[in-house]
Each structure stands twice: as structure tokens, then as C-alpha cells.
Image: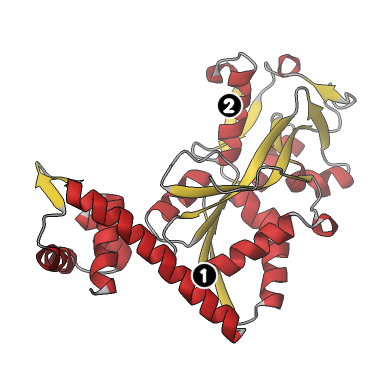
Amino acid sequence: MSDRRLQVFFTVARLLSFTRAAEVLHMTQPAVTFQVRQLEEQLDTRLFDRTHNRVALTDAGRLVFRYAERIFETYAEMEDALRELKGAVGGALVLGASTTVAEYLLPTLLGAFLRSHPDVGISLRVGNSDSVVAMVEESEIDLGVVEAPVGNRNLVVQACLIDQLRLIVPPDHRLAGRSSVTLADFMDEPFVCREEGSGTREVIMEYLTRQGYSRSRLNLCMELGSPEAIKGAVVAGMGVSMLSESVIAKEVALGQLVAIALDPPLERPISLVHARQKFRVPTLEVLLRFVREYCTDADREPRGIHHSTAAKEP
């Protein structure tokens, strides 16, 4: 059986769209349809129902999908084993990361990885957490690193680090002398927040909900697309905000911002997100192993990042 036909089928089945599968695989839609029909003829069964512009797996299609997933995982394990036997790691990986992770957490980690594996090429795409997860879903990237919860059960989500957020205010703010604050202490303050789809924004909104506040209760005065822009707005006295300790370390050290602990604390996992099917990029497993070891190495623990005890795949 042709691996290509099975891979094309697997992509269509995962996305439930011939059009999106063609985009992901860089094929024309007729070519995708042809490959699936060839596989259906070879297996002598219909794999998809196509009615009213919708695509759904048949019972046979669901069965083939489960076996295809196992086949690709086994194939990936075989390639990894061969690479280890030859003592060689190479290839290219495409990573996606949310803005905070890409700017403040990944550079040191990726630098260490590339020093250990100089034959691996890495490119990085930056977006908010929602867009990074979407890129993983559509196989545009091999691995996503995000700071927001991920609800897609078809993806492997592994918590790696625990990040803690602080309230940030200018040095002359009325709360600047406090060692900790509750939401009630600043709910009426103008609040500078990340844009919709940002992982930081989502964890802040979930924090409000857990404390019994409506998401609309926050006094939003401005929405900005990067941590740097938010820090600038707070320094200028335009409002207060909540950001990761790792993001604000420099400004706090320079006395430009004051970081105040939240009561109760606001923590979030930094998570690795990838497809369960790893057939296309065997080198991904090498990177994942490296990141797991890196995240549990106390000597490399970044400022404001704490170890997670929940670093197991579901």
C-alpha cells in the first residue's frame, strides 16, 4: 500500500475537508480526491460520505483512520530508532509560539538545542495562542508552544513549565507599595490587556471567573498586540495590567515598573502542543525529549518560571 495514499486519507480524515487537506499537503484538490479514491478502490470500501457539502467518515473510514494513526506512529518510532542507531539527528522543524514564549522563553532553549544538534534546522512562526494551535491542527507547524489551555483532544498537550503572572503598575501608582493585591483592589482601574485570542488574555479572564467576577467586569481601556506595547502603556500611566514575571524582569530591575503578587496567585502552564501522528517529522521526538529534560533542569530555570509536576502526555 502506498504511504502517500494513506497519508492523504489521514489528512482528509483529520480535517474533514478535501480543500483544507489539499492546502496542508500542497496538492491540488483533484489530486487529493484521486489519491483517496485509489485507496478506496484498493481497500474495496467507501471511506467518506460526501453529502450536502459535508465530509464524514464511514464506519470503514473510522477503522482505517485508527489503524493509519498507529501505522504512522510506528513508522516514526522506526525512523527514530534508526537515527539513534546511526548516532545522527538531522532534518528541519517548524515551530510556532505565542508572543510571550517566542520573545522571552524560547531563545535560550532553542540556542541550547541547536548547540547540541547542529544538523537540525529550525524556523519559528509567532502568533497568539489560538493561531498557534490552529497551525498545529492544520499541520502547518510541527510543534506549538503556548501559554493558554488547549481543548482539542486530537492533539497531544504536555505541560512543561509553570508561569506566574503579576499585576504591573507604574512606580508612583497608589498600589505600588503593596506586597500583594486581590482583584477587588484594582477592578476599577483602567486595564491594558492583550487582544482576543491571546493566551495571556484568556488566562486572565479565566482567573476573573474563578474569583466570581464576570469577564465584562474588567475595566478594559486598551487592547494591545504584544507584551512590549503593554509595558510601554503601563509605564506611561495609561493603566495597569497583568503579565508574566519573565516578561517584566528587566523593567522591574530598572525601576520602570512595579510587580505585585496576586492573591490568590495566577499561574498558567507553558505547554507543548503537537499532533498525535508524527510520521512527517521524526526529529520532533528528539526536540521533545530535549525540552522535557531542559524544563526539569533546575540549573536552567528562567526567572519567574517554576517547574510543573504535570509533564505527562494524556
**Seen in the image, is 57 located left or right of residue 255?**
left
Expressed as whole percent of the image width and height from the top left, the position of residue 309 reads 71, 43
For disc 1, the neighbor class at 10 Å (few under 14, some 14 to 19, many from 20) is some
Toward which corner of the image does residue 76 lie, by quadrant? bottom left
Expressed as whole percent of the image width and height from the top left, the position of residue 101 reads 64, 52
Q: Which residue is pictured at 41% across the width and 59% down the height?
A: 277
Q: Which of 175 and 293 is in front in this view?
A: 293
Expressed as whole percent of the image width and height from the top left, the position of residue 209 reads 58, 19
Q: Residue type at mark 1: give it.
A: Leu
Is residue 169 placed above or below 308 in the rendered structure?
above
**N-terminal-most mark, 1 or 2:** 1
Q: Residue 206 carries which label?
A: 2
Q: Which of 38 and 54 is in front in this view?
A: 38
Is residue 307 placed above or below 218 in the rendered structure?
below
Position of the N terminus by quadrant: bottom left
Toward which corner of the image does residue 52 lie, by quadrant? top left
- Residue 91 visible in the picture: no
Expressed as whole percent of the image width and height from the top left, the position of residue 91 reads 51, 78
Say which residue label 1 marks.
93
For disc 2, the neighbor class at 10 Å (few under 14, some 14 to 19, many from 20) is some
Is residue 49 placed above or below 27 in the rendered structure?
above
